Image (cartoon, rainbow, N blue to C red):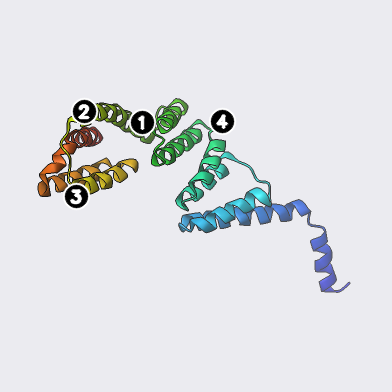
Amino acid sequence: MNSSKLILAALLLIPSSWTRVTRLNNAIKTAEKSYSEANYEQSVADHLVLVNEFEYKSSELHFDLGLSHQYAEKVDEALTWYDQTTQSPNKKLASFAFNQSGVITGNKKEYEAALSKFQSALIQDPTNEQARYNYEMLARWLQRDEERKNQDQNKPEPSDFAKRKKAEADRLVEQFNFNDALKVMQDAMSQDSTVAAYQDFMTTLQEVVEIDEN
């Protein structure tokens, strides 16, 4: 028997499971590489190979798919994978998934639902400081927002400039960027006195920023 036949015979003796394990490990490395390079569209595709071709299932994989979809700005798909991750027996991982779901839900202006997500994150893992921060900030914001709605009826009419700056600050609040939102309003106040119509809004921002700094 010549050498080529010997090699072929040896290959035929390798169990197919070994080949599958090698291919699976390579697919995992590929998915890890695209995510680490912040190529999130490709990361989604690479991680889905593990799900669809290898039927690989794990809470960590589901969470990575959630992150990849979120960073690729496919938030509805991200929520689906985070929801699966919240069922993980790994409490810390489930907590992270609840927190990320809360951020997405908050950005969609579903504030009560977001607050519930952050609360669930803390139930899963009381040491999750990011979830605690998000919960406390949003809870305080919702409380003050309700008070502000009752008071705004007596406020003077702000100028178009003031309204534009308020809208800009609102967008920053939706992203939980309270400090940047406060700076926008303070700068606007120095240029237009009618920005004072949003004084309660600014006061709330100041309180939230002070909590963050402490």
* Circle 3 residue: 161
Mark 3 neighbour class, 10 Å CA radius: few under 14, some 14 to 19, many 20 or more: some
- The type of residue carrying mark 1 is Tyr
The residue under the point 56% across, 30% down is: 89
* Circle 2 residue: 151
Local secondary structure at mark 4 = loop
Local secondary structure at mark 1 = helix
Q: Where is residue 97 in the image (x, y as percent from the top left)?
A: 48, 37
Q: Distance between the residues labelled 2 and 1?
A: 25 Å
State which tag comes first along the sequence, 2 or 1: 1
| Mark number, residue 33 | none
Q: How far apart are marks 1 and 4 (CA)?
A: 23 Å
Local secondary structure at mark 2 = helix
Q: In this view, does 23 lie to the left or right of 95?
A: right
Position of 184 relative to 84 (above/below):
below
State which tag comes first along the sequence, 3 or 1: 1
Q: In which image quadrant can residue 22 be found?
A: bottom right
Marks 3 and 1 in Cβ contact (< 8 Å)? no
* Circle 4 residue: 89
State which tag comes first along the sequence, 4 or 3: 4
The answer to whether any part of residue 25 appears in the image is: yes
The residue under the point 41% across, 39% down is: 103
Marks 1 and 4 in Cβ contact (< 8 Å)? no
The residue under the point 47% across, 33% down is: 95
- The type of residue carrying mark 4 is Pro
Q: Distance between the residues labelled 3 and 2?
A: 21 Å
- The type of residue carrying mark 3 is Phe
* Circle 1 residue: 135
